[in-house]
C-alpha cells in the first residue's frame, strides 16, 4: 500500500526490514545499544560486527531518542537506532516517547539527506506496546513530517507479520481520511 503525503509518500510492506535497499533502516534498539532479540538481533546478525562496534563507541541512547551508524554489510547504507518505550499501562509517557522516536529518527534522516527510510513497528514486540495504538502514533508522526519537509521522500513501514500490517493499514487509511 502506498499513499502520497505532502511531496513524499508513506508505503506499507510486509517483510524483513534487514533486506531493504534504502538510505537508512531504523532499528528498534534498547538504551544500551547492546543488541538483543527481535528486529535488533536480526539487524546485527545480517549487518555484521561493524554496527555493534559503532554502537559501543556511541555508548547508549535515551528512550525516545535516535542515533546513527553505518549499515555495515546491510544493503541499507545506514542504521538509525531509536529506543522505543517499554509499555507499562499507557500512563507513563509511552505515547509521547514513541512519537519522539519517529520524530527524532526522521529529523536525523532529514539532516543527513536520506531520501528513503524504512521503519519497523517500534516497541510492539518485546516492549509490548499495543499495535493499534502504536500504529496510530507512528503514522501520525510520519505524515506530519512529510507534510512539513521534503526529505525523506519515501518512508516505508516494513511490518513483519500480517496482523501488524493490518494495524498500520487501518491507521494509514484513518490518517488520510482526516
Ligand atoms: P521492541 O523491543 O521495540 O518491541 P521488537 O524487535 O521486539 O522491538 O519488535 C518490534 C517489531 O519488529 C515487531 O512487530 C516484530 O515482529 C518486528 N520484527 C522482528 N524482526 C523483524 C524483521 N527482521 N523485520 C521487520 N520487523 C521485524
Image (cartoon, rainbow, N blue to C red):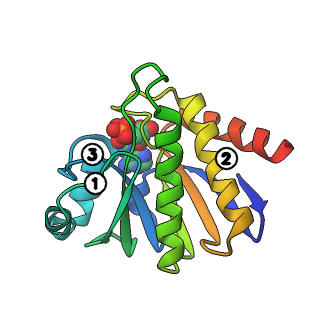
Q: Is mark 1 within 8 Å of ligand 1?
A: no
- Would you say residue 21 is visible in this rendering? no
Q: Secondary structure at mark 1?
A: loop
Q: Nearer the viewer, mark 3 or mark 1?
A: 1
**Residue situated in front as seen by the camera: 64 or 82:** 64
The residue at 29%/56% (across/down) is: 43
Specify the quarter for ligand 1: top left
Task: Give whichever of discs 1 and 2 has the lower sequence position.
Answer: 1
Q: Residues within 10 Å of mark 3 (few under 14, many from 20)?
A: many
Question: Pointer 3: what residue?
Answer: 30
Q: Residues within 10 Å of mark 2 (few under 14, many from 20)?
A: some
* Mark-to-mark CA distance, 2 and 3: 23 Å
Question: Pointer 1: what residue?
Answer: 61
Residue 125, percent from left and from top: 39, 33
Q: Is mark 3 within 8 Å of ligand 1?
A: yes
Image: 68 above or below 135: below
Amino acid at each position: 500500500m502506498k499513499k502520497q503525503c505532502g511531496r513524499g509518500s508513506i508505503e506499507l510492506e510486509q517483510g524483513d526490514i534487514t533486506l531493504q535497499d534504502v538510505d537508512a533502516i531504523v532499528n528498534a534498539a534498547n538504551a544500551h545499544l547492546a543488541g538483543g532479540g527481535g528486529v535488533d538481533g536480526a539487524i546485527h546478525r545480517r549487518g555484521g560486527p561493524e554496527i555493534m562496534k559503532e554502537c559501543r563507541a556511541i555508548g547508549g541512547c535515551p528512550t525516545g531518542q535516535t542515533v546513527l551508524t553505518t549499515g555495515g554489510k546491510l544493503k541499507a547504507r545506514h542504521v538509525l537506532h531509536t529506543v522505543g518505550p517499554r509499555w507499562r499501562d499507557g500512563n507513563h509517557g509511552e505515547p509521547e516517547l514513541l512519537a519522539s522516536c519517529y520524530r527524532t529518527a526522521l529529523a536525523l534522516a532529514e539532516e543527513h539527506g536520506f531520501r528513503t527510510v524504512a521503519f519497523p513497528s517500534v516497541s510492539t514486540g518485546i516492549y509490548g506496546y499495543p499495535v493499534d495504538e502504536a500504529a496510530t502514533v507512528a503514522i501520525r508522526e510520519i505524515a506530519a513530517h512529510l507534510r512539513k519537509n521534503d526529505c525523506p521522500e519515501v518512508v516505508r513501514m516494513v511490518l513483519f507479520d500480517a496482523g501488524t500490517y493490518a494495524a498500520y493499514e487501518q491507521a494509514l487509511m484513518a490518517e488520510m481520511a482526516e
